[in-house]
Amino acid sequence: MSARTSRLSLNQWTTRRWSVAEAVDGCVRHGVEAIGLWRQDVAAQGLEETVKLVADAGLRVSSLCRGGFLTSGGPEALDDNRRAIDEAATLGAACLVMVVGGLPGVVPGEPPGTISRDLPAARERVAEALAVLAPYAGERGVRLALEPLHPMYCADRAVLSTLGQALDLAEAHPSERVGVVVDTFHVWWDPRVLEQIARASGRIASYQVCDFLSPLPADVLLGRGIMGDGVIDFGPMTRAVAEAGYTGDVEVEIFNADVWAADPDEILARVKAAFAEFVGD
């Protein structure tokens, strides 16, 4: 692997057609040294089998996705996040990505139920849940990574819409327990993003890259593209993340129907080339 791609990590959903075993094999064949895993795929493969596959391949686990959805409250959400923390610890993942959840009563992909429109209260629920989960994660050596999502997902997926909001919550906890995710798709638009990346020094748990397509598809969840196919200028953010002291893996995470339908080997080859051109080390 060239120096320009030595920190590239394949987030498993970029090649969604591949199982864990197939994705691990793909990383080995393409010279990719790290992988970001998803809980449902790990469960399908088997947790212990996944640990063995990753270890035998010599890969790093850059993240486990995902914990979160904390705004609904209740012991069920906390119990599921404890299980996610345990899985991340077993996998030796660098972090557990936390998509914190939207307004209570708004569920992704389902008709609205009884909706709470109290956005500040939803964010307070996230803070309360973190106060419970962060010590548990710390005991198991797992770092929680709060991921702010683009504001168009505020209602149903994440009431944290800016890196600044994520840092406001993370800073209540030791940095080794709670960090943040810098995902180019979600934060590129923010006029304060470079300032907030600098503020995040010591708190960046994951740097994820993909492009923002314009126009967006009808399903805006699938508006991510391979770097260079959209509108994001990756240079300033990548430099800011480096200047903030982040030296970990850089995940390529793409949700895109055309990418998913294509040959995963071809996609991974394109990802490596685009990573070297637009992101690099």
Image (tube, rainbow, N blue to C red):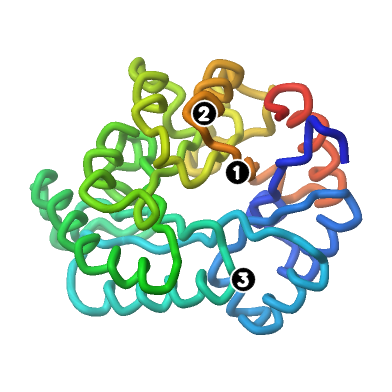
**Residue 242 higher or lower than 12, as above or below:** above
**Residue 175: x percent and y percent?**
35, 49
**Residue 191 versus residue 219: which sits nearer the camera?**
191
**Residue beneath the point at 46% across and 37% down:** 182
What is the three-letter code of the residue carrying label 2? Val
**Residue 119 versus residue 141: which sits nearer the camera?**
141
**Residue beneath the point at 56% across and 63% down:** 93
Q: Residue 41: which numbered mark, if any? A: 3
Whether residue 260 is visible, yes or no, is: yes
Q: Which is more N-terminal, label 3 or label 1?
A: 3
Residue carrying label 2: 241
Q: Which is more N-terminal, label 2 or label 3?
A: 3
Apparent side of residue 73 relative to residue 194 in the rendered image (left or right)? left
Estimate how packed mark 3 is, as few (under 14), some (14 to 19) or many (20 or more) residues with alpha carbons within 10 Å. Answer: some
Tell me the SS state at disc 1.
loop
| Number of disc labels | 3
**Residue beneath the point at 88% across and 49% down:** 30
Callout in the foreground (3, 2)? 2
Q: Which is more N-terminal, label 2 or label 1?
A: 2
**Residue beneath the point at 35% across and 42% down:** 153
Callout in the foreground (1, 3)? 1
**In which quadrant is the N terminus drawn?**
top right
Instruction: Assess whether mark 3 and mark 1 are in contact (beta carbons under 8 angstroms).
Output: no
**Residue 22: x percent and y percent?**
80, 66
What is the three-letter code of the residue carrying label 3? Asp
**Residue 243 higher or lower than 1, as above or below:** above
Estimate how packed mark 2 is, as few (under 14), some (14 to 19) or many (20 or more) residues with alpha carbons within 10 Å. Answer: many
What is the three-letter code of the residue carrying label 1? Gly
Residue carrying label 1: 248
Tell me the SS state at disc 3.
helix
Instruction: Assess whether mark 2 and mark 1 are in contact (beta carbons under 8 angstroms).
Output: no
The CA distance from mark 3 to mark 2 is 29 Å
